[in-house]
Amino acid sequence: MVLIKKSLKSSKTLGKIPLLLYGRVFMETIFSTLKINLLDPLLIQQYLLPWYDKNRRVLPWRALPKHKPNPYHVWLSEIMLQQTTVSTVIPYFLNFIHLWPTVQALSEASLDDILHAWQGLGYYARARNLFKCAQEIAKHYKGDFPSAQNTLLKLPGIGPYTAAAIAAIAFEKNTSPVDGNIERVLSRVYSIDIPLPISKSLLKHLAIHHTPLHRPGDYAQALMDLGALICTPKNPRCILCPLKDFCRAFQNGKAEIYPLKVEPSVKPTRILDALWIEDRSGALLLEKRPHKGLLGGLVMVPIPYLNKNEENLFFKEETFPLKGFVSHAFTHFHLKVRILRSFIERDSLPLLENQFWCPLPDISQQALPTLMKKIMHHVL
């Protein structure tokens, strides 16, 4: 993969063109202008599907050959897999379907229980939207997932990729999901010299060009497996790839540099204090974070000003700063946390509505984010 600081003016313009609003003639004109020769629409599937039938990954949410997929399993796995690796997701997925075997059961759970089961997966807005989506499906669709991509898009937490993936994999609809694996495969097959994210709409149209009417779900999963097993970001195993005979990046000996990417901006760093406040009985002051904002609905020690405009604990007792910092990365910034420790009489501190005392041995029963676990490890 190559990082590019500045893109061509034509590339910037391309990123603004809503390619999907136009028909095939316009698409072919765009590709011709960019000097990208389209392959036969059937070519990739002809080589890829036989490879997939022999090499497909066995995953707990994936239906066995000739078995009907479970839409609940497809949806749950796709939500969990956002920004998360397969190996990380598998135990969480198995635990969820053990606790809540159906979307109806999930809709009847408590959000606190869902957040507790989700802790460690990160991006907790996914868990909150998961619960909202389950409730909508139970209420408005009698527990059955809608099959149409446009209808799926209206549900909480389901964006264009997830809607297309569910429609294709669970319902064999002729939709074209494009995740990071698929972007990488198509970028290499076509040797796309326009960097991501500018080339996203272009790659989406290439995906549509090659999506088959027959077995679209298997085709989508085959591209994902190819990207995960063969066409990997580093050290791709090109010699084993079923597409190598017409992969332009491989033919040019440059597979590993694709997809090109615009160099990301540097994330800012915020430095905040966390209040580790214990009473004389050994209970710790905790608070349930507001549902909107960072770590929404999860349980933490107070970190004033983590979210803007939220009510904060006014604490004027003597504190003892611990050595070092706890570091944590959020999507848009890095956080360094200094821990201020204090021992007080419980009655001396008026609490906010979302705050409570918890005996230290019982903390693990709360829905704790990874940041809180790092803080506990630093203190204890």
Image: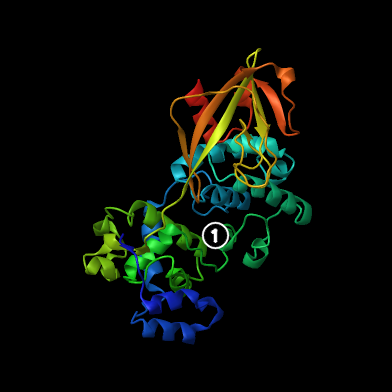
Judged from this view, the residue extending furthest toward the left is 253
Residue at 41%, 52% (x, y): give it: 56
Q: Nearer the viewer, residue 347 or 236?
A: 347
All told, the count of numbered labels is: 1
Is residue 152 among what the camera can see? yes
Q: Is residue 269 left or right of residue 102?
A: left
Residue at 23%, 69% (x, y): give it: 251
Type of amino acid at the residue the image marks with label 1: Ala
Residue at 63%, 47% (x, y): give it: 308
Mark 1 = which residue?
A: 165
Colouring of the image = rainbow
The secondary element bearing badge 1 is classed as helix
Q: Nearer the viewer, residue 210 or 26?
A: 26
- Classify 367 as above or below 318: below
Q: Is residue 53 left or right of residue 62?
A: left
- Classify 339 as above or below 269: above
Q: Nearer the viewer, residue 359 or 119?
A: 359
- Please provide percent x and percent y for residue 22: 53, 82
- Within 10 angstroms of label 1, few (less than 14), some, or many (20 or more) residues? many
Q: Is residue 324 left or right of residue 213?
A: left
Question: Can you tell which quarter of the image residue 314 is in?
Answer: top right
- Please provide percent x and percent y for residue 157: 63, 54
- Classify 358 as above or below 55: above
Is residue 98 among what the camera can see? no
Q: Quadrant of the N terminus?
A: bottom left
- Please provide percent x and percent y for residue 239: 24, 58
Question: Can you tell which quarter of the image residue 127 is in?
Answer: top right
Judged from this view, the residue extending furthest toward the right is 139
Residue at 73%, 49% (x, y): give it: 135
- Please provide percent x and percent y for residue 209: 45, 75
